Amino acid sequence: MNNLEKASLSCQQIVDAVRKVFVGDELIIRKLLAAAMANGHVLFEDYPGLGKTLLAKVFTRVIGCNYGRVQFTPDLLPADITGGKIWRPQDGRFELIKGPIFTNVLLADEINRTPPKTQAALLEAMEERQVTIEGETLALEMPFFVLATQNPIEQEGTYPLPEAQLDRFVVKLSMGYPSTVEQETTILKRRVNWRKDDPSVDVAPVITQPEFLALQAMAENAIYIDDSILEYVSKIVRATREHKRIEIGSSPRGALSLLKLSRCLAVIYGRDFVIPDDIKLIAPDVLSHRIILKVEEMIEGTDARGIISEILNNIPAPLEFKRKV
């Protein structure tokens, strides 16, 4: 078994371990895993009670990384996230008290319930993987990524994320309601067997932190992307800027995110090269939160994901692309 096969097997073991607790679409878990392997931040936006927080907590434990959680509230301060320096009179010095952001995976629960000033405390960490506290810059331990949740229907008392911060999330995911009666019944059966509200505390890691870093390195360095795929991605992103129903299209960061995630999907599915289907699979999740629709489209309730799907249907995928020899 070569390294790629071992990596793909590890990915499947991660997915299987999460599914033992979380009941839902396996594809959502694969997309979450791809985003984590790309060291990218994930925004979960869905109705209350669908398992957003549970999925985030179980996933972080399965991949064997350190875990931190912040419950975002209207009175939360930036220092509650980053930490600060406290004067110790007995020692005659300031002592640095690190906040919950000093971890591998930060669960930012209900991120849109805190004011913009506190939301902005995450920006430096999300972009540069470092935190500056009173002039002192501290590097965060790798891997580091944010799993944030928000409720799209209850807007009273919330503060919508600014576009600059939305752009830092590599994907926006939504799991939706259980698709079948059997799936909903399975949720109830598992809840009866847990006999506790938080089953994630009993979840054992499938891989270690160094092994997860090795997965990230493989996705970054060992997966080939043909020039025809690069051109395909460029056409998709440019189409978001030229679409008649879109006011502002995706930034180049959207194209880079597509490349990163497509490489990770290739590893998950056991390939050492990217295919157009990787791009099609993840594009709506990567680009829908990076576009701003025209006002009339917003009023009519046009779905941004639907427009991205329309763009994908209108741009021919490359039929021939080389595999690295």
Image: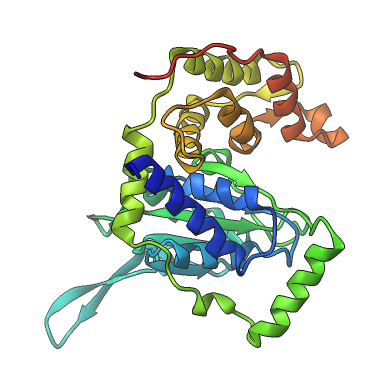
Check the picture and name the quadrant holding the N terminus.
Answer: top left
Residue drawn at x 56%, y 31% as measured from the top left: 278
Residue drawn at x 60%, y 35% as measured from the top left: 282
Residue 205: x and y in percent read 42, 68
Residue 156: x and y in percent read 75, 60
Residue drawn at x 53%, y 64% as measured from the top left: 17
Residue 135: which quarter of the image? bottom left
Residue 142: x and y in percent read 31, 54
Q: How many marks?
A: 0
281 left or right of 294 in image: left
Q: Is residue 160 visible?
A: no
Check the picture and name the quadrant holding the C terminus.
Answer: top left
Closer to the camera, 85 or 41? 41
Closer to the camera, 132 or 10? 10
Q: Residue furthest front?
A: 1
| Rendered view: 88 above or below 311 | below
175 left or right of 182 in image: left
Residue 133: x and y in percent read 29, 59
